[in-house]
């Protein structure tokens, strides 16, 4: 089962998303950039769902600290499906189908890359 | 007689004075000779008056007096030598004196007449000269007046020109003011949207995630639960649509332009509203230009505009009708002055520039005139509460304007609304 790490400073959103994804994925949750990076080191996720606005650091900083780990950005800042730093972006509110599709697409892409 | 006299006088006046006097003396001597020869049978005495009067008139008082004295002497001696004898001694002494006095009086009278005539003439001349001067003066004044009048006319024209210039700049100022107001409105709405979006989208995301959690649970099979979840999801969609349009409205600034054909875009947009078309029993009439125009556009943005226009058209025909979509290539004919809806700005398009025209027509009731002016205004909507944000056409027009094009709306002659887009090729 693929491991998914959700980093979002809205505890309710992170919790409900993990509930919705449970069963399909092994999900872990963090509510700040630092705790998220710590969780990533320990949990070794296949993909990180990353909020752009975080209390302690920006989503961009977290993303570059994560290195090669695939990232899907979740944001409430804008609509468009444009990508940030080559990573796909989903606009909140996001529907489960779209989220699962994005996770699958991102992890499929990374599996073709050489492993870490 | 008068003519002869005037001629004679004029001739004499042209002669030098001594000549005139000499002629007078000659005439007097000739008359004296005649007096002597005729023995007093002729009344020669009276004829002496002619040279006296002529000299007095022509040569003046002194000459007249001189001739009179000469004539008196000649007359006396002519009588004396011709042997005329007066019987009465009183006559013998007094006759020459009386004759001389008479001659002198005539000379003086004629000279006085001549003087007063000269004075009169001089006065007339002076008066004439004064009148002429006056006429000249008046002419000059008239000329001055004409010049001044022309100058006035010129300055009147200048003033009228200046007034027209002022009116023009006033109109431009008003247009600019309207544009500024609109820009300020847009900016404040944009700031508001960007601020609000983050705070609203997160709660919506929580609700959506909650709905997704509750789905596929055992109690989801209960019809009431399923319906409630469906309603909640639709509510989230509605809220999200408003926020999304607000965000589009605030920042539709980046276009990803590609040279693309228009027809596939129209077909794709029609496909996206296919469900709505079927539900409202709306048929589609396609009139696409055979030349298959290609133009630089952001496919996603233009698709958004088209879907927006199609959705509006379908919603205007809830009980069925016809959606007409037309494209053609033409040269831009200039701003439409008869219908200014959607054209408050001066278009970026130049007259004669080749443009692609997209016309979207419905057979609905159209939009009443006072509202037609406002349909591009932010937050203006004719739809029922909850169905429209009032931002769709505003955003659509901004997207078209970002493509360098213009968007217009007009009621069709019979019924229905036509929205047209012109984008430069």
Image: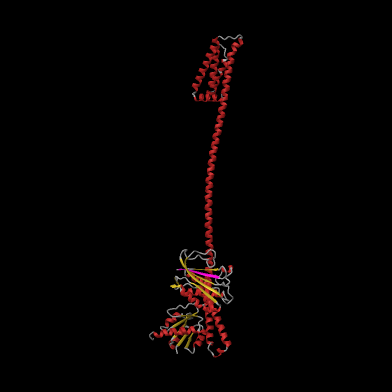
Q: Magenta region: which residues?
A: B417-424
Query: Would you place residue B354 above or below residue A79 in this image?
Result: above
Compare residues B192 and A111 and report the one nearer the observer. Answer: A111
Q: In which quarter of the image is the N terminus of chain A?
A: bottom left
B197 within the magenta span: no
Query: In the image, residue B25 lies at what x, y percent?
Result: 51, 18
Residue A24 x %, y %: 48, 89
In this orientation, which residue lies closer to the viewer: B193 or B28? B28
Q: Is residue A31 visible?
A: no
| Image quarter (top left, top right, bottom left or bottom right) of the C terminus of chain A | bottom left
Judge left or right: residue A58 versus residue B377.
Answer: left
Location of residue B389 (image quadrant): bottom right
- For the question of whether residue B261 can be seen, the reply is yes
Tell me residue A67's x, y (percent). 41, 83
Instruction: Work out whether B363 lies above or below A73.
Output: above
Looking at the image, what colour scheme do you see? secondary structure
Q: How many marks?
A: 0
Residue extending farthest to the bottom is B218
**Position above or below: B164 against B2:** below
- In the picture provided, is B384 more to the left or to the right than A21? right
Q: Position of residue B31 (x, y in %)?
A: 53, 15
Residue at 56% from the left image edge and 28% from the top image edge: B119
* Rendered view: B213 above or below B95: below
Main SS type for the magenta part?
Answer: strand
């Amino acid at each position: 089962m693929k491991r998914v790490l959700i980093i979002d400073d809205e505890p309710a959103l992170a919790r409900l998303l993990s509930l919705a994804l449970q069963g399909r994925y092994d999900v872990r949750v963090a509510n700040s950039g630092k705790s998220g990076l710590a969780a990533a080191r320990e949990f070794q996720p296949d993909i990180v769902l990353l909020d752009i606005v975080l209390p302690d650091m920006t989503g961009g900083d977290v993303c570059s600290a994560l290195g090669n780990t695939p990232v899907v950005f979740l944001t409430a800042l804008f609509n468009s499906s444009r990508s940030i730093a080559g990573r796909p972006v989903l606009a909140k509110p996001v529907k489960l189908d779209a989220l699962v599709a994005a996770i699958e697409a991102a992890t499929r892409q990374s599996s073709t890359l050489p492993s870490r | 007689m008068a003519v002869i006299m005037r001629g004679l006088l004029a001739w004499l006046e042209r002669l030098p004075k001594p000549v005139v006097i000499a002629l007078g003396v000659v005439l007097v001597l000739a008359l004296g000779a005649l007096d002597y020869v005729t023995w007093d049978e002729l009344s020669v005495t009276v004829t002496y008056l002619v040279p006296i009067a002529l000299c007095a008139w022509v040569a003046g008082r002194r000459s007249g007096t001189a001739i009179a004295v000469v004539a008196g002497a000649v007359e006396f001696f002519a009588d004396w030598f011709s042997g005329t004898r007066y019987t009465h001694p009183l006559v013998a002494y007094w006759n020459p004196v009386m004759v001389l006095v008479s001659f002198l009086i005539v000379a003086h009278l004629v000279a006085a007449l001549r003087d007063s005539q000269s004075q009169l003439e001089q006065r007339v001349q002076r008066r004439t000269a004064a009148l002429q001067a006056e006429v000249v003066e008046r002419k000059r004044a008239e000329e001055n007046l004409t010049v001044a009048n022309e100058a006035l006319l010129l300055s009147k024209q200048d003033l009228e020109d200046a007034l027209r210039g002022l009116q023009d700049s006033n109109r431009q100022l008003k247009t600019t003011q309207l544009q500024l107001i609109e820009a300020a409105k847009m900016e404040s709405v944009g700031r508001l949207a960007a601020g609000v979006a983050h705070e609203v989208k997160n709660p919506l995301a929580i609700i959506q995630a909650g709905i997704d959690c509750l789905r596929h649970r055992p109690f989801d099979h209960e019809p009431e639960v399923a319906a409630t979840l469906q309603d909640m999801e639709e509510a989230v969609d509605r809220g999200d649509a408003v926020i999304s349009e607000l965000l589009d409205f605030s920042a539709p600034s980046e276009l990803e332009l590609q040279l693309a054909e228009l027809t596939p875009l129209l077909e794709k947009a029609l496909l996206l509203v296919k469900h709505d078309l079927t539900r409202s029993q709306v048929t589609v009439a396609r009139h696409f230009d055979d030349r298959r125009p290609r133009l630089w556009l952001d496919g996603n943005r233009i698709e958004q505009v088209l879907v927006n226009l199609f959705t509006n058209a379908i919603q205007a025909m809830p009980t069925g009708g016809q959606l007409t979509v037309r494209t053609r290539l033409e040269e831009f004919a200039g701003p439409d002055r008869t219908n200014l809806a959607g054209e408050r700005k001066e278009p970026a398009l130049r007259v004669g520039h080749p443009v692609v025209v997209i016309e979207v027509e419905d057979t609905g009731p159209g939009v009443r005139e006072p509202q037609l002016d406002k349909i591009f205004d932010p937050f203006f909507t004719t739809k029922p509460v909850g169905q429209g944000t009032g931002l769709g056409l505003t955003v659509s027009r901004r997207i078209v304007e970002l493509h360098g094009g213009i968007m217009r709306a007009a009621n069709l002659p019979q019924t229905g609304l036509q929205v047209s887009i012109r984008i430069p090729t």
